[in-house]
Amino acid sequence: MGNTSSNTPADISALVSLAKDGSPHQKERAAWALSDLSFDLDNQVRIAAAGGISPLVTLLRDGDSVQKEIAAGVLWQLSLNSETRANFAASGALPVLVSSLLSSGNSHEREAAAGALWALASIRENGVAIADVGGLYALVDLVQRGNVNERQVAAGALWALSGTTEHQAVIAALGGIRALVSLASDRDCERKENALGVLWNLAYNHLGRQDELAACGAIDSLVDLSRTGTFKQKELATGVLGFISRFLSAQDKEDIAANGGVETLLIRVDSDS
């Protein structure tokens, strides 16, 4: 079929029907076809309109390892579209995606499930529902034990979910701070800003978490990122350093200032005083 927008709603409806009611082989082939189509924005809307999310959720929950991996990938693609995002909660996707994070199976399945939750958390009601079905625990667990791709995507989902005081408290209580500091310090992690974004939210105006950040060795990594990271990483790292500035040595403060972080750091220091 190809991944163009030339596929008709009837074509997509037929694939959705096979993904729902076909033989195991037909379900797998239909899921592959939907995966190919799901990279096109128009097709994403058509798949959702044809009721495609629900059978994909069923495959993710009950399918074999290949079906689960494919379904997770398609759901991730569909979740990135603001026009299809609202269809997920009603299809029962959220608890199934959370369960996939804890799966001992395919790494791609776990990464895709975390990516879908990251996108879906942009809707406030979804964020509450994700937390209610154990999503914060599952995401922190993945940051702690996953490979680097899983960890940085899970951190992105936690960043999206860490905007409320309730969620911040849960993430911190689950050991999230140490896990996120470890990720931000990992040389293989390319998206350190995801971990830094959560740490920013957790440390803001909370002395206990600021103390924990300093105690678990965050300062060296934060100072390094404030000097050598991307623009966003420098901004976030310097902001978190501002929250814990009372722990910084005079040399650390001089190094940050020398590398362009002085304005943000001074703002943070002034706001804490």
Image (cartoon, rainbow, N blue to C red):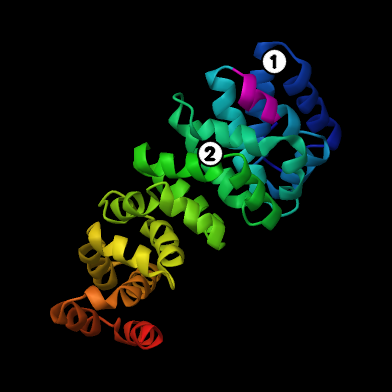
Is residue 14 positioned above or below 162 on the image? above
Quadrant in the picture for the C terminus: bottom left
In this rendering, position of residue 263 left or right of residue 103: left
Magenta stretch in the rendered image = 56-63
Is the stretch drawn in magenta largely helix, strand or loop? helix
- Could you tell me the amino acid type at mark 2? Ala
Residue 146 or residue 65, whichever sits in front: 146
- Residue position for label 2: 112
Residue 268 place in picture, x, y as percent: 37, 82
Residue 39 in sight in this render:
no
- Residue position for label 1: 26
Q: How many numbered tags mark residues here?
A: 2
Label 1 neighbour load within 10 Å: few <14, some 14-19, many 20+: some
Is residue 198 positioned above or below 81 on the image? below
Element class at badge 1: helix
State yes or no: discs 1 and 2 in contact (Cβ < 8 Å): no
In this rendering, position of residue 159 left or right of residue 94: left
